[in-house]
Image (cartoon, rainbow, N blue to C red):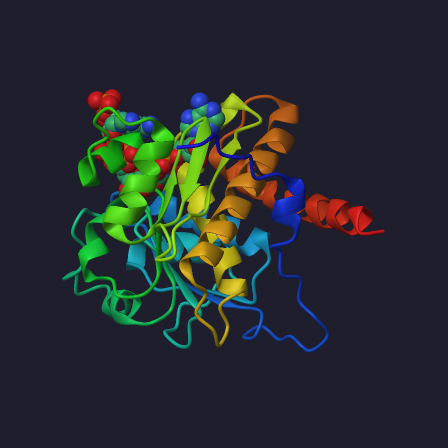
Amino acid sequence: MEHIGEWGAAEAAAHIRIPTAQDNKYSHGVLGVVTGSATYPGAAVLGVEAAHRTGIGMVRFLGEKEPASMVLSRRPETVTVSGAVDAWLVGSGMEADPYFNPELPDLARACLGLQPILLDAGGLALLDQVSAPAVITPHEGELERLVPQGEDSNEDWAARAADELGVVVVLKGHETIIAAPEYESGGRFITRVTAPTTWLATAGTGDVLAGIIAAIIATHSHNRVPHLTELAEYAATGVYLHGQAGLRAAQQGPFPALELADQVSRAVQELIAEGSSSQL
Ligand SMILES: NC(=O)C1=CN([C@@H]2O[C@H](COP(=O)(O)OP(=O)(O)OC[C@H]3O[C@@H](n4cnc5c(N)ncnc54)[C@H](OP(=O)(O)O)[C@@H]3O)[C@@H](O)[C@H]2O)[C@@H](O)CC1
Ligand SMILES: Nc1ncnc2c1ncn2[C@@H]1O[C@H](COP(=O)(O)OP(=O)(O)O)[C@@H](O)[C@H]1O
């Protein structure tokens, strides 16, 4: 594969959807979230916090009771009633096969619906059930279980996995690769984001990333279903923001993942400011 380019501020700024005077909490995107479990309730809190701070009309948390109560204590803005959803975030902190969990009636709706879906962690096991355009966010260990790397470089591996699985692959690491499947006419979207700080290598930062990307997708998915290349652009934008939030959090030294999520608002604000000054 030829050398791939870095997704930077200019590319990312073009994919942030700022609410207009005509927008309301529904038209600016509703994200349905099915994450967390009694074992890992914290993953739900991290993803929901990150989604709110990315800028979105509404977050509906539709996961299990235990994570739901933790999410509500941290973020009372979160809605826990089933209803209209523009995009889904599924799987962070969930058991490996959650499909038949009776506590999760919205999970089948997420998998079988037309709205775009981000599958993280335990949600990766649901890939076969999903019919909508999907983004997956594996680390190397998780992608190895789905599509073995063999002798491929990470770039070739992510691209091959995108083709084999028919989804956007976000292969996480110090360098995160974002790859969409090859178009019928040839060519593909593939890009990379190099993390600006290695302090991101802590438990829970991937749960934050999933919340950021899913929120960006939801803001672009009201009454429309983006195609896979667009989803890859939103995913790359999320990875860029994640790195920038990490850089800001690291100004105070090493940080836990919830503080990374706290910095997402500032990263979005500064990206918008940079984007508008570059258009002057
Ligand atoms: N606060 C919370 O609630 C939190 C909840 N969390 C939730 O925990 C659940 C389990 O997630 P998980 O990632 O820890 O476990 P799993 O899927 O078994 O993979 C781990 C194995 O894969 C391998 N491996 C290879 N490359 C790797 C790499 N680059 N990065 C990492 N691993 C790599 C490595 O094996 P090794 O190569 O070392 O033999 C390792 O043993 C999941 O639902 C998640 O959302 C966490 O987010 C933390 C905060
Ligand atoms: N050495 C590193 N430098 C910078 N970022 C890293 C490094 N290692 C991992 N990351 C990032 O940290 C996050 C970890 O995600 P993940 O492995 O899913 O952990 P968790 O499930 O605990 O949230 C990913 O966004 C990944 O890109």
Image mark count: 0
Ligand 1, image quadrant it occupies: top left
Which corner quadrant of the image does residue 130 belong to? bottom left
Q: Is residue 255 above or below residue 147?
A: above
Residue 33 vs 93, above or below: the answer is: below
Q: Is there any visible trace of residue 212 in the rendered image?
A: yes
Q: Quadrant of the N terminus?
A: top left
Q: Position of residue 105 (x, y in %)?
A: 23, 69
Determine the residue located farthest toward the right in the rendered image: 280
The answer to whether residue 138 shows anywhere in this view is no
- Image point (54%, 56%), residue name: 52
- Residue 244 is situated, as x and y percent measured from the top left of the image, at 61, 36
Q: Nearer the viewer, residue 1 or 94?
A: 1
| Image position of 138 (left or right of 200) | left
| Left or right for 11, reference 255 | right
- Front one among 114 and 155: 155
Q: Residue at x 34, y 38 (%)?
A: 158
**In the displayed structure, does residue 97 sit left or right of residue 182?**
left
Locate residue 76, reporting x and y percent. Answer: 51, 61
